[in-house]
Image (cartoon, rainbow, N blue to C red):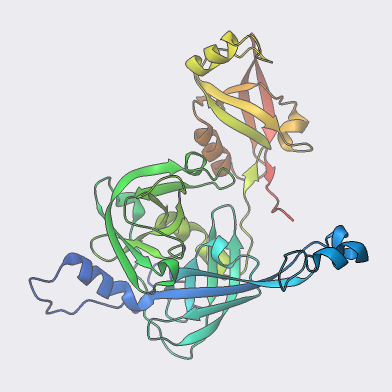
Amino acid sequence: MLNPLEAGAAPIVAQAPAAASSSRSFVAAAVDRIGLAVVRIDTERTITRSPDPFMSDPFFRRFFGDGGYGVIPPGGEERLRGQGSGFIIDSSGVILTNAHVVDNADRVTVRLKDGRTFDGEVRGVDEVTDMAVVKINTGETLPVASLGDSDQVQVGDWAIAVGNPLGLDNTVTLGIVSTLNRSSALVGIPDKRLEFIQTDAAINPGNSGGPLLNAQGEVIGINTAIRANAAGIGFAIPINKAKEITPQLARGERIAHPYLGVQIATLTPELAKQNNDNPNATVILPEVNGVLVVGVVPNSPAASAGIRRGDVITAIDNQPITASEQLQDMVERSGLNSNLRLTVRRGDRTQQISVRTAELQPEP
């Protein structure tokens, strides 16, 4: 299969008409360029509800019937349906989307813009970066999305979101890039390792997995998250992050992520002083900039190295650390089985602790 991200690849890209009217907006031209490559993804999966001990008792069934559970009593099976978006990145039918759109799905159906549907095969899923690759076989050459360079994106640039929000196919919204490098921890999804493009283009359920475009109709991000408590704020995975791992996902390979096994939070002198001034504080913290260890995963590299709850990490390999996302990024970039020398403040003492990274295992 052609790797759409290799140099020299020449995919077919849906282009805007050469003789576009001067009154035609750049948004319309950008959407024309990618429109045929955007797809709707429908999923189905089966869940089994745990048996209800009360309903196994004939006495309770006599008085309460099905207990108000409807046609699917606890202990039965139910089909859950989901819906999202994606975009074609290889003319043979390779599609990029979010992991949470297709993860654990029993069936994936891909709907093209012309209304045709095809069964989708999930080639690879990486929950840590929330990306997945789906493959369809149509027997024909398909139009593909042109991938841009998210490193060139600047705050204030136009941002165009395309997808199928709330089941409304082929929806386009417009906004600007509000900020860059917004950490997943600040967005409220600390189990991911991402730095998002933040936009005010409207992103709703169903947009997940769809493309975020620049003014030229190039994909600069993958729409992936919205905050339930904030209107008009959306987040997208930078497309350059997708370029790093998509070839592996398309081959069905698992993406290895290093980890230490610590739950962390950014610490400032002000926050430490607030804690220390509290008479009910369970630990006295050094009033410094660093990363506070709020928990240690049992049997993890950090636990084996002797890292403790309440430790403050101030440097890794002599590089100062002042934010939790900075530590997370350094661990991710370090690779597997790397020895990291942590500078740790424990009470009024400073010490060096070596930790060897291990592979983060997916949750069962």
Q: Nearer the viewer, residue 191 or 251?
A: 191
- Which residue: 57% across, 65% down? 249
Q: Position of residue 190 (x, y in %)?
A: 56, 42
- Above or below: residue 63 compared with residue 225: below
Along the line of sight, which residue is nearer the eye, 9 or 276? 276
Q: Quadrant of the C terminus?
A: bottom right
The residue positioned 36% from the left and 44% from the top of the image is: 180
Q: Looking at the picture, how far across and down is residue 179, in whole percent? A: 33, 43
For the view shown, which residue lies furthest in the bottom direction?
A: 139
User: Is residue 116 found left or right of 275 in the rendered image?
Assistant: left
Residue 206: % across, % down: 46, 65
* 97 shown above or below 236: below
Nearer to us in this view, 164 or 134: 164
Is residue 231 visible in the rendered image? The answer is yes
Q: Residue furthest left?
A: 22
Q: Residue at x 8, y 71 (%)?
A: 23
Give residue 89's position: percent from left, percent from top: 42, 72
The quarter holding residue 362 reads bottom right
Which residue sits furthest front?
63
Q: Quadrant of residue 20?
A: bottom left
As drawn, 30 above or below 127: below
In-image side of 76 versus 43 (left or right): right
Residue 196 appears left or right of 15: right
